[in-house]
Image (tube, helix red, strand yellow):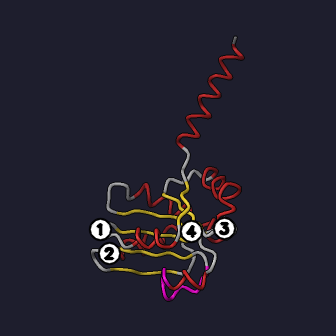
């Protein structure tokens, strides 16, 4: 009987964990552009990253921390995976779950960088990590093609929000 209770308890725990797991939506460029063009006073922190990019993986916790730090302010973090869509179930979802990311994660399903890079930002060379700070109401936009430390990211965000 104890074994049966354990199995039922374990199954319930697994179902609860699966229900709470972060969803990763696959989107195309027009959907991303639509999200980034919203006429709101929310500051968006958009980080373009990939599971195979060492500097990206290293800095992701700094971005995810912003979701908690600024949860009561008009700040939204969007983590845009640049992995291939075919890697969604094999790499991206397991990575997101393993790292317990709280920020919204999407996978940009585009295969031709020559088409989408300049549409996201004309200055973007394609290097990762790439970060965009954006506030449409205030008509502010700044980009960074670099890896951030927690302190550097906080400093840039605070300066941007002034």
What's the CA distance linking mark 2 and mark 1?
6 Å
Q: Is residue 147 above or below residue 13?
A: below
In primary-sequence order, the first of circles 2 and 1 is: 1
In primary-sequence order, the first of circles 3 and 1 is: 1
Q: Which residue is mark 1?
A: 40
Please rate how many residues cluster around mark 1, counting C-alpha atoms within 10 Å: few if below 14, some from 14 to 19, many from 20: few
Q: Is residue 121 above or below residue 64?
A: below
What's the CA distance linking mark 2 and mark 3?
29 Å
Quadrant housing residue 85: bottom right
In primary-sequence order, the first of circles 4 and 3 is: 3
Nearest to the eye among marks 3 and 1: give it. 3
Asked if disc 2 and disc 1 are in contact, CB closer than 8 Å, the reply is yes
What's the CA distance linking mark 4 and mark 3?
8 Å
Q: Main secondary structure of the magenta part?
A: loop
Q: Which residue is mark 2?
A: 136
Query: What residue is shown at x 54% (from left), y 40% (from top)?
Result: 19
Q: Which residues are magenta?
A: 119-127
Q: Quadrant of the N terminus?
A: top right
Seen in the image, is 140 located left or right of residue 90? left
Across and down, in percent, residue 41 comes to 28, 68
Please rate how many residues cluster around mark 4, counting C-alpha atoms within 10 Å: few if below 14, some from 14 to 19, many from 20: many
Query: What residue is shown at x 46% (from left), y 76% (from top)?
Result: 132
Tell me, for residue 108, which label it has, or none. 4
Q: Which residue is mark 3?
A: 84
């Amino acid at each position: 009987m104890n074994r049966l209770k354990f199995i039922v308890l374990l199954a319930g725990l697994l179902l609860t964990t699966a229900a709470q797991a972060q969803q990763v939506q696959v989107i195309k460029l027009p959907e991303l552009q639509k999200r980034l063009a919203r006429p709101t006073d929310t500051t968006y922190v958009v980080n373009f990253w990939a599971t195979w990019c060492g500097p990206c993986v290293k800095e992701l916790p700094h971005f995810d921390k912003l979701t908690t730090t600024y949860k009561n302010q008009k700040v939204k973090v969007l983590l845009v995976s640049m992995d291939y869509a075919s890697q969604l179930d094999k790499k991206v979802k397991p990575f997101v779950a393993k790292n317990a990311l709280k920020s919204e994660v999407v996978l940009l399903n585009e295969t031709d960088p020559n088409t989408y890079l300049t549409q996201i930002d004309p200055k973007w060379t394609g290097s990762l990590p790439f970060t965009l700070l954006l506030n449409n109401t205030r008509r502010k936009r700044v980009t960074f093609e670099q890896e951030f430390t927690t302190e550097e990211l906080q400093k840039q965000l605070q300066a941007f929000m002034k």
